[in-house]
Amino acid sequence: MTRFASPVTSFGAAGRHLGSRDSRPIGHNTSVERLSETRIAIRFHSTNVITFHMDGRITFDTGGWWSVTTKVRLNSLSPCQIWSEGDGDWAIQGPTGDGARFEDGITMGADGTFQNWKEARALLRASRARRFAIKDAELAAMTGDSA
């Protein structure tokens, strides 16, 4: 398991880790960066994978790097759990149990719910419906059934 220099999972913890600095390493290719007075990010390589907002919101972004290593940073340095679904999509669950399909830019509110979860869930449902329709059509073609 990856270990980080400090348990940073909130705006306050990130601010304490930084102290008076604007940037401070926390792990291999990973640092805590002060973006403004109201935002502090966890940067992995050149991507702000987690942004803590002073008002308690947390924004997640892989920068297109949907890797195991990115997922380790997201899981270890946020109060959320992120996992891969069997179809290759990622899912995210907050500390309150609210969950959604993971998408870059998804934001968890201070109350632990995902603010753009309706859009994410609608996309997930549509994607799964298309996959099942294609599989049903392929199966019907193979068996000679007409659906």
Image (tube, rainbow, N blue to C red):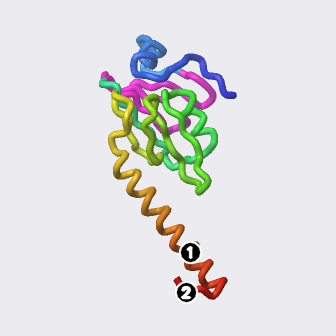
| Disc 1 target residue | 136
Q: Which residue is mark 2?
A: 146
Amino acid type at circle 2 is Ser
Q: At 58% from the left edge and 39% from the top edge, which residue is drawn?
A: 71
The location of residue 80, given as percent across then percent down, is 49, 32
Identify whether 19 is placed above or below 56.
above
Can residue 36 be seen from the camera position used here? no
The residue at the point 48 percent across, 37 percent down is: 93
Q: Nearer the viewer, mark 2 or mark 1?
A: 2
**Left or right: 9 as drawn, with respect to 73:** left
As drawn, is 35 to the left or to the right of 65?
Answer: left
**Residue 44 appears in the rendering:** yes
Q: Is residue 141 magenta?
A: no
Say which quarter of the image contains residue 143.
Answer: bottom right
- At horizontal 40% and vertical 42% (from top left) the residue drawn is 106
For residue 16, above or below residue 147: above
Q: Secondary structure at mark 1?
A: helix
Disc number placed over residue 86 in the picture, else none? none
CB under 8 Å between discs 2 and 1:
no
Q: Which residues are magenta?
A: 25-54
Foreground of the two, 104 or 119: 119
In magenta stretch: residue 53: yes
